[in-house]
Structure formats: structure tokens, C-alpha cells
Amino acid sequence: MRLCKGKTMAAETTDVMIRKCLRLMSEKLDQAAAIARAARTCAEAGSQDRAIQIVFDVETRLYDARTLLAAVALFNREVRDDAPR
């Protein structure tokens, strides 16, 4: 099914999903950066052990961001493969 601007319905849906993944990825990276700043603050205040405990919370956010990046790459490949030539 083609839409007005020559895009298929699947391409339009993919565009929406890519934007959503990028938004979520940005949020995860912002969270990771905030956690890293908190860990740095603890370390600078002399609480090395607490800083290490805090910084381990970054791992999940980075994993999620990486997974979202992989999803964007997959969506992009699918759109390219489905594009008329």
C-alpha cells in the first residue's frame, strides 16, 4: 500500500518506530550520564566504594541503549531493502 509521498505503510510505521527507539535511546543515555556524574561526585568526595556501587547502575542503561541502536539499524536496513529501485 502506497501513501501520498510514495512511502509504503510499512515505511511510515518504520519511521515512527525509528523515532521512538532514538527517543528511548537518548533517555537511556541521559540516565547513564546522570548516574556517572553521581558516581564521580561520590569519588571526588572520597567515597570510592559508594562511587563504584553507583556506577554499576550504568550498565543496564548502556545495554538498553545498545539494543535500541541495533533495532534502529535493523529498521533502517528493512526500509532500504523494501525501497523501490
Image (cartoon, rainbow, N blue to C red):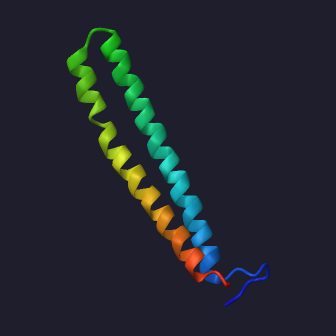
Which residue is the extreme one toward the bottom?
Answer: 1
Residue 14 horizontal/vertical position (percent): 57, 72
Q: Eyeballing the image, is 60 above or below 43?
A: below
Give above or below for 71 relative to 56: below
Q: Who is closer to the viewer here, 50 or 76? A: 76
**In which quadrant of the rendered view does residue 20 lie?**
bottom right
Expressed as whole percent of the image width and height from the top left, the position of residue 43 reads 31, 15
Q: Residue at x 56, y 63 (%)?
A: 18
Q: Residue furthest left?
A: 49
- Residue at screen point 42% across, 50% down: 65
- Residue 36: percent from left, percent from top: 38, 28
Q: Residue furthest right?
A: 4
Residue for point 30% across, 41% down: 59
Q: Is 44 placed left or right of 83 in the picture?
A: left
Could you tell me which residue is drawn at 56 percent across and 79 percent down? 81
Image: 18 above or below 82: above
Q: Residue furthest front?
A: 85
In this rendering, would 41 be left or right of 69?
A: left
Q: Quadrant of residue 5?
A: bottom right
x and y, in percent, of residue 68 in the image: 44, 57
